[in-house]
Image (spheres, rainbow, N blue to C red):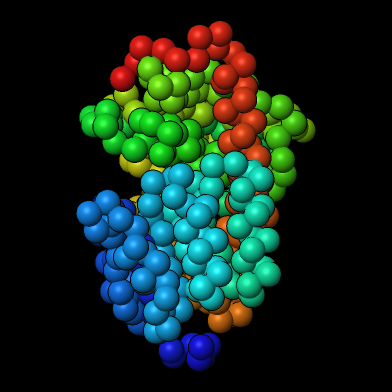
Amino acid sequence: MDTTATTPLRWGAIGSTSRIYRNALAPAFAASDHHVVVAEASRANGSERPYADLLARDDIDAVYIPLPNNGHRPWILAALAAGKHVLCEKPLTMSAADTAEVFDAAEAAGRVLMEAYMWPHHPRARRIMQLVHDGAIGEVNAFRSVFTYPASNPADHRFDERGAGALFDVGIYCLAPPMLMLDRDPVAVAAAATRNAKGIDVAMTGFVDWGRGVGSNFDVSFQAPQRRILEITGTDGILTVPGQHTPGPETASQILIQRRDDAVEVIDVEGASAFVGMVDQFAAVVRGQAPAVFGRRESVRLARLLDRLHAASAASDPNPAGDAQ
Protein backbone atom coordinates (compact mmCIF):
# COMPACT_ATOMS: atom_id res chain seq x y z
CA MET A 1 0.00 0.00 0.00
CA ASP A 2 1.17 3.53 -0.80
CA THR A 3 1.49 5.20 2.59
CA THR A 4 2.10 8.77 1.38
CA ALA A 5 -0.04 11.49 2.91
CA THR A 6 -1.84 12.07 -0.40
CA THR A 7 -3.07 8.52 -0.93
CA PRO A 8 -6.52 7.89 0.57
CA LEU A 9 -7.09 4.82 2.71
CA ARG A 10 -9.40 2.41 0.87
CA TRP A 11 -12.10 1.28 3.29
CA GLY A 12 -14.53 -1.57 3.57
CA ALA A 13 -17.42 -1.49 6.07
CA ILE A 14 -18.63 -4.72 7.67
CA GLY A 15 -22.14 -4.30 9.02
CA SER A 16 -22.86 -1.32 6.80
CA THR A 17 -26.55 -1.05 7.75
CA SER A 18 -25.68 -0.03 11.30
CA ARG A 19 -26.92 3.36 12.48
CA ILE A 20 -23.49 4.54 13.65
CA TYR A 21 -21.98 3.80 10.25
CA ARG A 22 -24.74 5.45 8.24
CA ASN A 23 -25.13 8.51 10.48
CA ALA A 24 -21.55 9.15 11.59
CA LEU A 25 -18.74 7.15 10.00
CA ALA A 26 -19.85 7.14 6.36
CA PRO A 27 -20.24 10.96 6.42
CA ALA A 28 -16.85 11.27 8.15
CA PHE A 29 -15.12 9.19 5.48
CA ALA A 30 -16.81 11.28 2.77
CA ALA A 31 -15.83 14.57 4.42
CA SER A 32 -12.10 13.87 4.38
CA ASP A 33 -9.66 13.55 1.49
CA HIS A 34 -7.78 10.86 3.42
CA HIS A 35 -10.43 8.16 2.87
CA VAL A 36 -12.52 6.45 0.24
CA VAL A 37 -15.10 3.74 0.93
CA VAL A 38 -14.59 1.01 -1.65
CA ALA A 39 -17.08 -1.59 -0.43
CA GLU A 40 -19.84 -2.16 2.11
CA ALA A 41 -21.14 -5.50 3.36
CA SER A 42 -24.19 -6.52 5.33
CA ARG A 43 -25.80 -9.86 6.12
CA ALA A 44 -27.59 -11.58 3.23
CA ASN A 45 -30.49 -13.81 4.31
CA GLY A 46 -28.82 -14.18 7.71
CA SER A 47 -25.47 -15.18 6.22
CA GLU A 48 -22.21 -13.43 7.05
CA ARG A 49 -20.63 -14.59 3.79
CA PRO A 50 -20.64 -11.00 2.44
CA TYR A 51 -18.25 -10.05 5.25
CA ALA A 52 -15.77 -12.73 4.19
CA ASP A 53 -16.12 -11.73 0.55
CA LEU A 54 -15.29 -8.14 1.43
CA LEU A 55 -12.18 -9.21 3.34
CA ALA A 56 -11.00 -11.22 0.33
CA ARG A 57 -10.81 -8.10 -1.85
CA ASP A 58 -7.33 -6.77 -2.60
CA ASP A 59 -8.48 -3.19 -3.14
CA ILE A 60 -9.24 -2.58 0.56
CA ASP A 61 -6.64 -1.33 3.04
CA ALA A 62 -8.75 -0.92 6.17
CA VAL A 63 -12.00 -2.24 7.60
CA TYR A 64 -14.51 -0.53 9.85
CA ILE A 65 -16.52 -2.88 12.10
CA PRO A 66 -19.74 -1.64 13.80
CA LEU A 67 -21.27 -5.08 14.42
CA PRO A 68 -23.01 -6.09 17.66
CA ASN A 69 -20.38 -6.44 20.39
CA ASN A 70 -20.09 -10.24 20.30
CA GLY A 71 -19.13 -10.00 16.61
CA HIS A 72 -16.15 -7.72 17.18
CA ARG A 73 -13.48 -10.22 18.19
CA PRO A 74 -14.03 -12.82 15.42
CA TRP A 75 -14.22 -10.25 12.64
CA ILE A 76 -11.29 -8.23 13.95
CA LEU A 77 -9.20 -11.40 13.84
CA ALA A 78 -10.52 -12.29 10.39
CA ALA A 79 -9.77 -8.82 9.04
CA LEU A 80 -6.25 -8.83 10.47
CA ALA A 81 -5.64 -12.30 9.02
CA ALA A 82 -6.71 -10.88 5.65
CA GLY A 83 -4.09 -8.16 5.95
CA LYS A 84 -6.42 -5.26 6.72
CA HIS A 85 -6.05 -2.45 9.23
CA VAL A 86 -9.05 -2.32 11.57
CA LEU A 87 -11.13 0.40 13.18
CA CYS A 88 -13.72 -1.30 15.40
CA GLU A 89 -16.56 0.14 17.41
CA LYS A 90 -16.45 0.17 21.18
CA PRO A 91 -16.20 -1.97 23.18
CA LEU A 92 -13.36 -3.40 21.14
CA THR A 93 -14.09 -6.82 22.65
CA MET A 94 -16.07 -8.05 25.65
CA SER A 95 -13.13 -8.90 27.94
CA ALA A 96 -9.64 -7.71 28.75
CA ALA A 97 -8.19 -11.06 27.68
CA ASP A 98 -9.85 -10.83 24.26
CA THR A 99 -8.73 -7.23 23.86
CA ALA A 100 -5.13 -8.20 24.52
CA GLU A 101 -5.53 -11.08 22.06
CA VAL A 102 -6.69 -8.91 19.17
CA PHE A 103 -3.89 -6.40 19.73
CA ASP A 104 -1.38 -9.27 19.78
CA ALA A 105 -2.83 -10.39 16.45
CA ALA A 106 -2.56 -6.87 15.02
CA GLU A 107 1.06 -6.58 16.07
CA ALA A 108 1.87 -10.01 14.63
CA ALA A 109 0.20 -9.00 11.34
CA GLY A 110 1.91 -5.61 11.24
CA ARG A 111 -1.45 -3.86 11.04
CA VAL A 112 -3.09 -1.01 12.96
CA LEU A 113 -6.02 -1.77 15.25
CA MET A 114 -7.93 1.01 16.99
CA GLU A 115 -11.08 1.27 19.08
CA ALA A 116 -13.55 3.77 17.59
CA TYR A 117 -13.76 6.16 20.53
CA MET A 118 -14.40 9.57 19.03
CA TRP A 119 -14.40 11.86 22.11
CA PRO A 120 -10.61 12.49 22.41
CA HIS A 121 -10.53 13.65 18.78
CA HIS A 122 -12.73 16.71 19.33
CA PRO A 123 -11.03 20.08 20.03
CA ARG A 124 -13.17 20.65 23.15
CA ALA A 125 -12.12 17.30 24.62
CA ARG A 126 -8.47 18.05 23.85
CA ARG A 127 -8.82 21.45 25.54
CA ILE A 128 -10.42 19.88 28.63
CA MET A 129 -7.59 17.37 28.94
CA GLN A 130 -4.99 20.13 28.49
CA LEU A 131 -6.65 22.36 31.10
CA VAL A 132 -6.61 19.53 33.63
CA HIS A 133 -3.02 18.65 32.76
CA ASP A 134 -1.94 22.28 33.18
CA GLY A 135 -3.60 22.61 36.60
CA ALA A 136 -6.26 25.09 35.48
CA ILE A 137 -8.64 23.81 38.19
CA GLY A 138 -5.92 22.93 40.69
CA GLU A 139 -5.49 19.40 41.99
CA VAL A 140 -8.28 17.20 40.62
CA ASN A 141 -10.12 15.10 43.20
CA ALA A 142 -13.42 14.11 41.59
CA PHE A 143 -15.09 13.31 38.29
CA ARG A 144 -18.83 12.93 37.69
CA SER A 145 -20.05 11.49 34.41
CA VAL A 146 -23.40 10.41 33.03
CA PHE A 147 -24.53 8.82 29.77
CA THR A 148 -28.16 7.74 29.76
CA TYR A 149 -30.84 7.41 27.11
CA PRO A 150 -34.20 5.61 26.80
CA ALA A 151 -33.64 2.57 24.56
CA SER A 152 -37.13 1.61 23.44
CA ASN A 153 -36.60 -1.70 21.60
CA PRO A 154 -36.12 -4.66 23.99
CA ALA A 155 -35.28 -6.87 20.97
CA ASP A 156 -32.21 -4.75 20.24
CA HIS A 157 -28.85 -6.54 20.62
CA ARG A 158 -27.91 -4.25 23.52
CA PHE A 159 -30.48 -6.06 25.69
CA ASP A 160 -29.04 -9.57 25.25
CA GLU A 161 -25.73 -11.41 25.03
CA ARG A 162 -24.89 -9.85 21.65
CA GLY A 163 -24.40 -6.40 23.15
CA ALA A 164 -24.48 -7.28 26.85
CA GLY A 165 -25.70 -4.10 28.40
CA ALA A 166 -25.38 -0.43 29.20
CA LEU A 167 -21.83 -0.50 30.56
CA PHE A 168 -20.47 -2.04 27.37
CA ASP A 169 -22.55 0.30 25.23
CA VAL A 170 -21.78 3.70 26.74
CA GLY A 171 -19.49 3.13 29.72
CA ILE A 172 -16.48 4.32 27.72
CA TYR A 173 -17.87 7.86 27.64
CA CYS A 174 -17.96 7.98 31.44
CA LEU A 175 -14.83 6.02 32.28
CA ALA A 176 -12.29 6.87 29.60
CA PRO A 177 -12.06 10.65 30.23
CA PRO A 178 -10.77 10.29 33.82
CA MET A 179 -8.67 7.31 32.74
CA LEU A 180 -6.99 9.39 30.02
CA MET A 181 -6.47 12.42 32.23
CA LEU A 182 -5.08 10.47 35.19
CA ASP A 183 -3.17 7.92 33.10
CA ARG A 184 -3.31 5.10 35.63
CA ASP A 185 -5.28 2.05 36.68
CA PRO A 186 -7.81 2.30 39.53
CA VAL A 187 -7.10 0.86 42.96
CA ALA A 188 -10.72 -0.15 43.67
CA VAL A 189 -14.19 -0.13 42.12
CA ALA A 190 -17.79 -0.51 43.26
CA ALA A 191 -20.93 -0.86 41.16
CA ALA A 192 -24.63 -1.74 41.28
CA ALA A 193 -26.72 -2.73 38.28
CA THR A 194 -30.34 -3.08 37.29
CA ARG A 195 -30.68 -6.16 35.07
CA ASN A 196 -33.31 -7.52 32.72
CA ALA A 197 -34.62 -11.09 32.72
CA LYS A 198 -31.56 -12.20 30.72
CA GLY A 199 -29.19 -10.87 33.36
CA ILE A 200 -28.05 -7.96 31.17
CA ASP A 201 -27.40 -4.61 32.84
CA VAL A 202 -29.89 -2.02 31.60
CA ALA A 203 -28.53 0.52 34.08
CA MET A 204 -25.42 0.72 36.22
CA THR A 205 -24.07 3.21 38.67
CA GLY A 206 -20.65 2.99 40.20
CA PHE A 207 -17.56 4.48 41.74
CA VAL A 208 -13.94 4.19 40.67
CA ASP A 209 -11.16 4.92 43.16
CA TRP A 210 -8.20 6.06 41.08
CA GLY A 211 -5.92 6.36 44.09
CA ARG A 212 -4.13 9.47 45.40
CA GLY A 213 -7.42 10.87 46.65
CA VAL A 214 -9.20 10.92 43.29
CA GLY A 215 -12.55 9.24 42.64
CA SER A 216 -15.10 9.19 39.83
CA ASN A 217 -18.82 8.50 39.92
CA PHE A 218 -20.63 7.28 36.82
CA ASP A 219 -24.19 6.55 35.75
CA VAL A 220 -25.16 4.68 32.55
CA SER A 221 -28.67 3.63 31.62
CA PHE A 222 -30.99 2.47 28.87
CA GLN A 223 -33.96 3.61 30.99
CA ALA A 224 -33.38 7.21 32.06
CA PRO A 225 -33.93 10.32 29.91
CA GLN A 226 -31.07 11.37 27.66
CA ARG A 227 -28.16 12.98 29.50
CA ARG A 228 -24.45 13.28 28.73
CA ILE A 229 -22.65 15.00 31.56
CA LEU A 230 -18.98 15.51 32.41
CA GLU A 231 -17.97 17.43 35.53
CA ILE A 232 -14.46 17.65 36.96
CA THR A 233 -13.82 19.05 40.45
CA GLY A 234 -10.49 20.44 41.49
CA THR A 235 -9.13 22.43 44.41
CA ASP A 236 -9.39 25.70 42.44
CA GLY A 237 -12.48 25.17 40.32
CA ILE A 238 -15.20 22.95 38.88
CA LEU A 239 -15.08 22.33 35.13
CA THR A 240 -18.34 21.62 33.32
CA VAL A 241 -19.51 21.42 29.73
CA PRO A 242 -22.84 23.01 28.75
CA GLY A 243 -25.05 20.55 26.87
CA GLN A 244 -23.85 17.08 25.96
CA HIS A 245 -20.13 16.50 26.37
CA THR A 246 -19.77 13.80 23.73
CA PRO A 247 -19.04 13.56 20.84
CA GLY A 248 -18.66 17.37 20.83
CA PRO A 249 -20.46 19.77 18.50
CA GLU A 250 -19.42 20.73 14.99
CA THR A 251 -20.11 24.37 15.89
CA ALA A 252 -18.30 26.52 18.46
CA SER A 253 -19.00 25.72 22.12
CA GLN A 254 -17.82 26.53 25.62
CA ILE A 255 -16.15 25.11 28.69
CA LEU A 256 -17.14 26.61 32.05
CA ILE A 257 -14.98 26.81 35.16
CA GLN A 258 -16.64 27.85 38.41
CA ARG A 259 -14.11 29.37 40.78
CA ARG A 260 -14.17 29.27 44.57
CA ASP A 261 -15.60 32.81 44.71
CA ASP A 262 -18.44 31.60 42.41
CA ALA A 263 -17.09 33.57 39.45
CA VAL A 264 -17.49 31.62 36.20
CA GLU A 265 -14.73 31.57 33.63
CA VAL A 266 -15.95 30.94 30.08
CA ILE A 267 -13.57 29.31 27.60
CA ASP A 268 -14.63 29.36 23.95
CA VAL A 269 -13.70 26.35 21.84
CA GLU A 270 -13.93 25.78 18.11
CA GLY A 271 -16.23 23.16 16.67
CA ALA A 272 -15.30 20.15 14.57
CA SER A 273 -16.44 16.65 13.70
CA ALA A 274 -15.03 14.24 16.27
CA PHE A 275 -15.64 11.41 13.80
CA VAL A 276 -13.59 13.06 11.03
CA GLY A 277 -10.86 13.71 13.59
CA MET A 278 -10.92 10.05 14.61
CA VAL A 279 -10.69 8.57 11.11
CA ASP A 280 -8.01 11.07 10.10
CA GLN A 281 -5.99 10.14 13.18
CA PHE A 282 -6.38 6.48 12.23
CA ALA A 283 -4.95 7.28 8.78
CA ALA A 284 -2.03 9.13 10.38
CA VAL A 285 -1.26 6.10 12.56
CA VAL A 286 -1.41 3.77 9.55
CA ARG A 287 1.04 6.04 7.71
CA GLY A 288 3.39 6.15 10.68
CA GLN A 289 2.85 9.89 11.12
CA ALA A 290 1.46 9.79 14.67
CA PRO A 291 0.97 7.47 17.63
CA ALA A 292 -2.57 6.36 18.45
CA VAL A 293 -4.45 8.72 20.73
CA PHE A 294 -6.45 5.76 22.04
CA GLY A 295 -4.32 2.71 21.34
CA ARG A 296 -3.47 -0.64 22.85
CA ARG A 297 -2.57 0.63 26.32
CA GLU A 298 -5.79 2.63 26.65
CA SER A 299 -8.08 -0.07 25.22
CA VAL A 300 -6.64 -2.83 27.40
CA ARG A 301 -6.74 -0.61 30.49
CA LEU A 302 -10.39 0.25 29.79
CA ALA A 303 -11.28 -3.41 29.18
CA ARG A 304 -9.74 -4.38 32.53
CA LEU A 305 -11.84 -1.70 34.22
CA LEU A 306 -15.03 -2.90 32.51
CA ASP A 307 -14.25 -6.45 33.67
CA ARG A 308 -13.86 -5.26 37.25
CA LEU A 309 -17.07 -3.21 37.21
CA HIS A 310 -19.10 -6.09 35.76
CA ALA A 311 -17.71 -8.36 38.47
CA ALA A 312 -18.38 -5.81 41.20
CA SER A 313 -21.97 -5.23 40.12
CA ALA A 314 -22.60 -8.98 39.92
CA ALA A 315 -21.13 -9.52 43.39
CA SER A 316 -23.38 -6.82 44.85
CA ASP A 317 -26.55 -8.41 43.44
CA PRO A 318 -27.75 -11.72 44.93
CA ASN A 319 -30.40 -11.98 42.20
CA PRO A 320 -28.65 -10.85 38.97
CA ALA A 321 -31.57 -11.68 36.64
CA GLY A 322 -34.15 -9.05 37.48
CA ASP A 323 -37.45 -7.99 35.99
CA ALA A 324 -36.41 -4.76 34.25
CA GLN A 325 -36.99 -4.60 30.50
Quadrant of the rendered image containing residue 313: top right
The answer to whether residue 210 of the structure is visible from this angle is yes
Q: Image point 64% across, 60% down: which residue?
A: 103
Q: Image point 35% across, 42% down: which residue?
A: 244
Q: Compared with residue 302, is residue 319 higher up or lower down, i.e. above or below?
A: above
User: Residue 166 or 124: which is nearer the viewer?
Assistant: 166
Where in the figure is residue 311, as x and y percent of width and height?
62, 25
Where in the figure is residue 3, as x and y percent of width and height?
53, 88
User: Residue 220 or 153: which is nearer the viewer?
Assistant: 153
Residue 134 in the figure: left or right of residue 240: right
Total labels: the figure holds 0
Where in the figure is residue 30, as x and y percent of width and height?
28, 74
Where in the figure is residue 325, as x and y percent of width and height?
31, 20
Q: Compared with residue 34, is residue 129 higher up or lower down, i.e. above or below?
A: above
Residue 320 in the figure: left or right of residue 133: left
User: Residue 170 or 240: which is nearer the viewer?
Assistant: 170
The answer to whether residue 31 of the structure is visible from this angle is no
Q: Image point 32% across, 24% down: which residue?
A: 223
